[in-house]
Image (cartoon, rainbow, N blue to C red):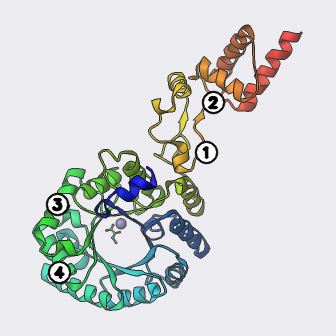
Amino acid sequence: MTNDSQSAQSDADRVVIFDTTLRDGEQCPGATMTFEEKLEVAELLDTMGVDIIEAGFPIASEGDFEAVATVANRAKNAVIAGLARAIPADIDRCGQAVKGARRGRIHTFVSTSPIHLAHQMRKSQDEVLEIITATVTQARNLVEDVEWSAMDATRTPIEYLCRCVDAAIVAGATTINLPDTVGYATPQEYRDMFLAVRERVPNSDKAVFSVHCHNDLGLAVANSLAGVAGGARQVECTINGIGERAGNAALEEVVMAIQTRADVLPYHTNIDTTWLSRASRLVSAVTNFPVQYNKAIVGRNAFAHESGIHQDGMLKHTQTYEIMTPESVGVSKTSLVMGKHSGRNAFRSKLKELGYELGDNQFEDAFTRFKALADRKKHVYDEDIEALVDEEIAHMHD
Ligand code: KIV
Ligand code: ZN
């Protein structure tokens, strides 16, 4: 999309990207990052146009506090958020951590579902309502930008959820996040929840609504987009979709879905998508979490084609089998992987790329030998093809 057409879009269609790689992402078992690694990730997120970076959970440890405070001091563009439970000491600590930011946000949350209230909080609905009013008011006295989250919102009765949201907005919350904490919702349910809350809560137009989806059923991205269809305008997500258990919605998938399907998802984000591949590699490297080969957008096979039919189509017109360009996500080019499924056209194009021009008979011989090799060997590299063709040429001269 051109800048011109982007600026022609209304602000009401702008989806704000809230990245929580450094907080929810880091909560994924084994994904701990060092202080320096967190700064490196934060710098890249800031450069690529992420609107809000949740840099950590300041009360959790000295290290987390330092990381949030340093990211807050260094960020050039993004709002810097820290997470705080609905506990006065958490909120104070978070306020201290984000105070050096150009714009700091306190993100405070409390559970609202019956199962959490009964077993985790051991509090009544009325007690939780009082906590919401007190903690959001406290946060709002420290910073102007306060986000309140209803943990386990998707398993909360809608009437009570609306009372909680109203209490948070009246106390000064500027963003209301309704997370699918356990990845339980379906897209239609999630969209309907946003529509209902926005319609029923008297002050709903005073806050931005936000989605935060976990991927336990593999629905995190679909649910996030459904929440946006229900009126949410902030998406919480992580690079590579890392996060608690099965992870969070993957930033790169949400952003590219919006960019690629503007015809049915009429929104826009501020992300420079050419950084997506680099961000994925960096997060994978610092967390030691490999990116699955067939991962959408950033997996190594996302722009690779092996079957003869697909390679033939790609050589004729790239849009036959690609719905976005590799360059748009920072990958230098499509790769036609040479293997047993490759056909003559792809083999001819590979030879040309490697600088060979063979006569018809030589080509047929080389192709037959290539197919035999591909049957024996999992990966046929350029060097294998060079060796095979050089042998073929030498043989012709014998
Ligand atoms: O999944 C969740 O509910 C959370 C909250 C802290 C926003 O991560
Ligand atoms: Zn979460």
Characterize the local packing of mark 4: few (<14), some (14-19) or many (20 or more) Cα atoms within 10 angstroms: many
Marks 1 and 2, how far apart at CA: 24 Å
Amino acid on which the number 3 mark rests in the picture: Leu
Name the disc covering residue 167, or none: 4
Which residue does the numbered mark 1 point to in the structure image?
A: 332
The percent coordinates of residue 56 (x first, y second) are 46, 76
Pair 1/2: label in front: 1
Q: Residue at x 49, y 54 (%)?
A: 273
Residues tagged 4 and 2 counted as in contact (Cβ below 8 A):
no
Label 3 vs 2, first from the N-terminus: 3
Does the closest atom of ligand 1 sit within 8 Å of the Cβ of label 3? Answer: no
- The residue carrying mark 2 is 378
Disc 1 residue type (three-letter):
Ser
Tell me if label 1 and label 2 are in contact, CB under 8 Å: no
Q: Residue 279: x, y in percent?
A: 55, 59
Depth check, front residue: 17 or 247:
17
* Residue 129 left/right relative to 254: left
Specify the amino acid type for callout 4.
Answer: Ala
Residue 215 quadrant: bottom left
Element class at badge 2? loop
State the residue at coordinates (30%, 57%).
183
Where does the image place residue 346, in percent across and percent down from the top left? 61, 23
Q: Is residue 246 visible?
A: no
Which residue is labeled 3 in the image? Answer: 195
Q: Is residue 265 above or below residue 181?
A: above
Q: Earlier in the sequence, mark 4 or mark 2?
A: 4
Does residue 24 appear in the picture of this structure? yes
Tag nearer the camera, 3 or 2: 3
What residue is at 52 percent from the left and 64 percent from the top?
A: 31
For marks 3 and 1, the one nearer the N-term is 3
